[in-house]
Image (cartoon, helix red, strand yellow):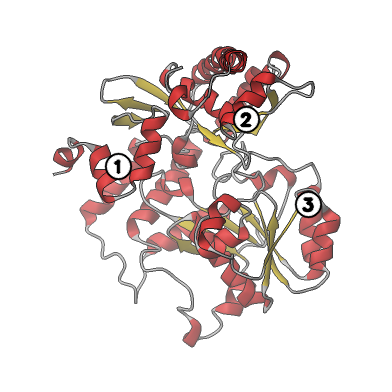
Amino acid sequence: MVSEVLAGDPFASYARSVNPQFVRMLRAIGFDRRWARAEGAYLWDADGSRFLDLLGGYGMFNVGRNNPRVREALVEALALETPGSVQLGVNSLSGALADELLKRLPARLGKVLFTNSGTEAVEAAIKLARGATGRPRVLALEHAFHGLTTGSLAAGDSPEFKAPFGPPLPGFDHVPLGDLEALERELRREDVALFIVEPVQGKGVNLPDPGYLPAAQQLCRDYGTLFCADEVQTGLGRTGRFFAFEHEGLEPDMVTIAKSISGGYIPSGALALRTDDLLQVFDSLEHAVLHGSTFAPNDLAMVAGLATLQEIDAEGLVERSRTLGERLLDATRPLVDRYDVVREVRGRGLMWAIEFGEPAAGSRAWRAVERAQRGLFAQFVVVPLFTDHHVLCQVAGHGLNIVKGLPPLTLTAEDVDEFATALDAVLVKAERIPRAAARFGLKLGASSLARH
């Protein structure tokens, strides 16, 4: 049955029954490939062409696509016909995965609640923090992204995702990254339940200045606010440490986990928190089921999580992320000096970004691009990387002026070098095309990009 369905036209059925605008977008930028298979850090299309995957399912595939050890564990679980999701009952799988996660977390965290996704883990953090502290407000950082469900969306700072849906939920406020005075002004009111931060901001791979997060954590301690590290994208080795908060020795009160926790096979997430905070909410038999989810934890997600943690350890993927991330930065940082439009190259581990901007001296080419479509220069890079060099990555950032990479941690040194070479080649052409357009007064658009 599956092979028969996959043999059909994916674009026709998706446009007909799911989201026609998404299909239009893929076709406009030349990303309308028919994908045939995937393994590790690679994708193959129906024509047999191999693509290097620097998108990584938005960070889902830390252990690689279709990881065979995780798949074997899932097949074993299916064969056992376990009585999963009894609901009024438990088995040892969820406890075992919680134990394994807690071994990798600070000792102050003693409990794990499972969810189906990262945004649900953030929702759980908001609810549990309010329940534990009795306070109503939530603070987050400007330019943050915490998910697209209602509470997570309010915690994030993404106007483009909020605007179509009316006013965000009340009780959520934002402070600038790095501004401790602004943070303390809000905390001093002593009505903030939770301060939630990404140790590295996912939308633009924005890194905090050294010392900011430890100082912010201490301010939260001083004013009775719970400090939450959102590790949905940065966790499980992505930044060269198992959790990104380890880079500055943080000890959060809450940690959200998701994306790659199940090896990319099963929707899964988790919230780790202090025992006392959990027991403030689950404080009686009457409140034993005060928060939960029908499918979390389900047996397959728990099995995949256990196998994923084993794979990360066995293959040394945390250290691999660190060393390959350093290699990637070394190979791409020289582009800042080589090209006027490259403003910065930054990253931590295998969470990488290149940011573009108009040179300080001005640029007719850059202004021509910006007049045609906001953030088009980044698309000038992403499209030929895909069509000409078979590298899949994404445009990101709140100004859409950033190209971002979140590859599987199974990447090789040769893959890093291949990408750096391709990026250099694309930037040569990407600067030349808008210059020609500016010279001849040509109008630039997404459909024209796919031809270059």
- Identified by mark 3, the residue type is Pro
Which of these two is toward me, 403 or 318?
403
Residue 340 position, x and y percent, is 71, 18
Residue identified by numbered label 1: 72
Residue at the outermost front position: 441
Residue identified by numbered label 3: 214
Residue 90 position, x and y percent, is 37, 70
Residue 335 position, x and y percent, is 67, 17
Looking at the image, residue 266 lies above or below residue 89? above
Q: Residue at 77% x, 63% y: name it.
A: 220
Q: Quadrant of the N terminus?
A: top left
Considering only order in the chain, which callout, 1 or 3, is on the residue closer to the N terminus?
Answer: 1
Tell whether 335 sits left or right of 152: right
Label 2 sits on a secondary structure element that is helix
Residue identified by numbered label 2: 370
Using the rendered image of the protein, determine whether residue 100 is visible from the camera's viewpoint.
yes
Considering only order in the chain, which callout, 3 or 2, is on the residue closer to the N terminus?
Answer: 3
Label 3 sits on a secondary structure element that is helix
Q: Residue at 63% x, 54% y: name it.
A: 157
- Identified by mark 1, the residue type is Glu
Pointer 3: residues within 10 angstroms few (<14), some, or many (20+)?
Answer: some
Pointer 1: residues within 10 angstroms few (<14), some, or many (20+)?
Answer: few
Residue 239 position, x and y percent, is 61, 38
